[in-house]
Amino acid sequence: MRIAVICANGKEGKLIVREAIARGADVTAVVRGENQSAAANVIKKDLFDLNAADLENFDVVIDAFGAWTPETLPQHGTSLKHLCDLVSGKETRLLVVGGAGSLYVNPEHTARVMDGANFPEMFKPLALHMGEALDALRARTDVKWTYISPAGDFQADGARTGKYILGGEELTLNAKGESVISYADYAIAMVDEALSGNHIQQRISVVAE
């Protein structure tokens, strides 16, 4: 399987590259600068400079893009639209490293994590922009997309346990009543989905056991 990881130099991107290579995938890192990931194959381009020809030979494209400053937050939507347009109508699947703020906290799917009174104000703009990008993605029937939300506590330096619980649209808690997952275990879930393709045009979520 041929997999391209966009923003492969990021913390999550590097772990996804490493996990995919360990599973025997043919992995290409898409990076703006010098490749810092474990991938031997590289496309050195900004995400917004990618064209359809760059991605046409991949079975799966994994979008690990992240933006954090007020000026760049809208790029969560514009970058995802750009990638969707590049793989529109193709067999190439697009997997997205998503956010937890848009997960629902009730069966009716009318209340989200980010709507809660205890949701940190400092993360609300990020959650809102990522939520809007997900809403736009849901409207794309021309793309074989999968959006994977992490648990509420997404730990960059957390341990790799090799285990996780697969959830859906609602915030899922583990047996300890926690919503937590490490970047490393999230990478396992991402590569599992890349290899299986079990949740096309769906948002799923993952939490540590």
Image (cartoon, rainbow, N blue to C red):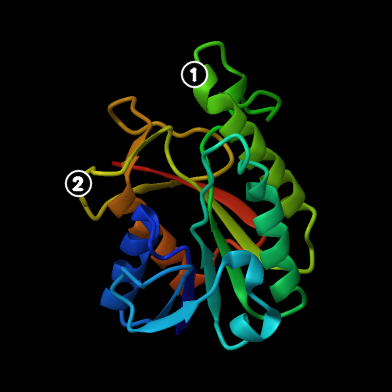
Q: Amino acid at mark 2?
A: Ala
- Position of the C terminus, as image quadrant, is top left
Q: Secondary structure at mark 2?
A: loop
Confirm whether residue 105 shows in the render: no
Instruction: Decide if residue 63 is in sight here.
Output: yes
Q: Is residue 202 left or right of residue 140?
A: left
Residue pointed to by mark 1: 120
The residue tagged with tag 1: helix, strand or loop? loop
Residue closer to the observer: 121 or 88:
121
**Measured along the vertical axis of the image, is residue 132 above or below residue 161?**
above
Residue shown at 65%/65% (left/top)? 48
| Mark 2 neighbour density, 10 Å: few (under 14) some (14–19) many (20 or more) | few
The mark nearer the N terminus, 2 or 1, is 1
80 versus 86 height, above or below: above
Q: Could you tell me which quadrant the N terminus lies in?
A: bottom left
Could you tell me how many numbered marks the image carries?
Answer: 2
Residue 172 percent location from the top left of the image: 45, 34
For residue 60, which quarter of the picture? Answer: bottom right
Q: CA distance from mark 2 to mark 1?
A: 25 Å
Q: Residue at point 78% right, 69% down?
A: 142
Residue type at the position of mark 1? Pro
Left or right: residue 44 compared with residue 178 = right
In the rendered image, which residue does mark 2 sit on?
A: 159
Task: Describe residue 24's horizontal placement relative to residue 69 as left or right.
Answer: left
